[in-house]
Amino acid sequence: MVRRLLALIAVMLVWSAPARADDISASGRGVVRIVTIAVVDDEVVGFGHGSGFAVAPNRIVTNAHVVELASRYPDNVVIGVVPSEGDKSYQGKLIAIDPARDLALIEFSGVRLAPLTLFTGAPTDGETLIALGYPGNVDLATARSAADFITPQSPVRSQGGFAGARTLEGTNVLLHTANIARGNSGGPLLDRCGRVIGVNSAITRADEGDATFAFAIAQSELAAFLREAKQPVATVGIPCTTVEEQMARDRNADDQARLLTEQEARAAAAKAETERQQALEKARARNEATRENFMAGAAVLLVLGALALGGAGLLLSRDRRREAVWVAIGGGVLMLGAIALFLSRPNFDPAQVMALPKATGSAALPSPDASRGKMICTLVPERSRVTVTATQSVTLDIGRDGCINGRTQYAEAGQRWQRILVPGQEQSVSVLDYDPATRTYTNTRYLLSAAQMTRARQLRAAVPLKSCSSDQTARANLATQQQAIRGALPPVYNEKLVYGCRAAPGASAVE
């Protein structure tokens, strides 16, 4: 009892806390410091730094002016890539540069970073934007030695508003008010969901008290540069929705569904009552007709019995005693039959009328066979929070006992099937859920730090069941192990993709 009370209190505390998925911190794990070191005759003659961000696990975008010296003097200038997490820095190699757009692409090895996603839409006037990077004035105030510039640390975050679109030296740029400084060059400008909408590149001069504005190379210019460099990048066009907004949508949807269910239940109950009344009226009419037939029959028998008794008396008066006795007996039988028939006439009892099934008001659920087999699952945008993942349809092969795609065992989670995926390379955990009753497939994603991923991978190593199995004990152990992973995840997700599934064309249900 005490354990249940503590669990209830914990749940109440979680629900009372503000829901917050820090998408900016998740994107920050893919932001790096770019350091350039010029060396002549083994002597450092120049040093510079800027910012950059991953567009692939081992490729970084930055400004061309950050790595200009490395482009001009590749044998004398070393490019250093300093991640925001870990304890090492890595040497990079310039593989593409566009001075006109002020963009460059760097490749490195030694660690895999979480790539950022580009937002293909346009910011709205006044929209909140966030800049991530390594401003030089902060470094000057906090750095104690040159080693601090190659020591991994999280990027600095600043927030401002979108101030308009402009053209700067023939390049499309975004004007914004997030505070940046020298050193932010090449860092990403993000929307609230952590998607890249620009690359910070310059600031206006603030002479005589003028307000300072910043310029970011527009995402359209960045996408064109990456295409020319043959560098694939993740893109999303769905507008940003905060977790709070999505949870409010979910609550509204639940309320609407509950209201619709109640309305359907009331309508079904009213229909059932109408049908019951109609059945009662029909039964009553049949009963009355049957009673009248019984009474008419009793009357006929009574009349015949009376005539028989009268005939017996007439025969007796003519001294035909034997015939009179038999006729009298027949008349008595007819009289008794009339009485019996009258007394046995049926009474109407509503309770004896067969009851109609009660309406539940819920939609008919698909049969188990209709929830299995090859399925095409399509994103339901109004039920989803999309931040960094592409939204193409998902193909699933739903087998018996939670076997998905013939190779992955899902564990029972109430009436649903669930599997938690912890990849070995990516910094994300996915909670995959399939509900056979509604044929709904959900991918809830958590974008985690390096330390959180290490813990999740340790727990994943203890999961005993990899492939599909009909062993209920093994599946129960899988469910227990997955709950341990679930408990290590943050209370609020970063992304939630909800898909509605239907049978694939030409597919047949699993036997």
Image: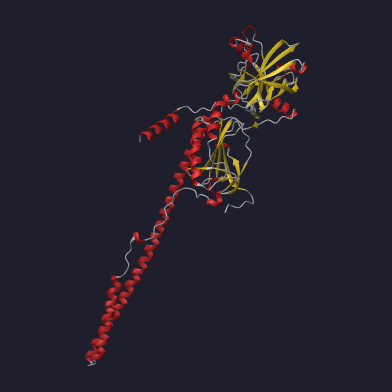
Tell which residue pokes out farthest to the top in this image.
208
Q: Position of residue 189 (x, y in %)?
A: 63, 22
Residue pictured at 50% horizontal, 40% vertical:
479
Figure quadrant of the C terminus: bottom right
- Horizontal arrangement in the rendering, residue 455 relative to residue 45 (left or right): left
Seen in the picture, residue 310 relative to 115 is either above or below; the reply is below
Q: Position of residue 226 (x, y in %)?
A: 72, 27
Seen in the picture, residue 440 relative to 101 is either above or below; the reply is below
Residue pictured at 62% horizontal, 51% vertical:
507
- Horizontal arrangement in the rendering, residue 214 relative to residue 250 (left or right): right
Residue closer to the observer: 342 or 76 = 76
Residue 143 occupies which quadrant of the picture?
Answer: top right
Q: How many marks on residues?
A: 0
Seen in the picture, residue 338 relative to 230 is either above or below; the reply is below
Figure quadrant of the N terminus: top left
Seen in the picture, residue 251 relative to 155 is either above or below; the reply is below
Tell which residue pokes out farthest to the bottom in this image.
319
Residue pictured at 36% horizontal, 69% vertical:
290
Q: Position of residue 223 (x, y in %)?
A: 70, 28
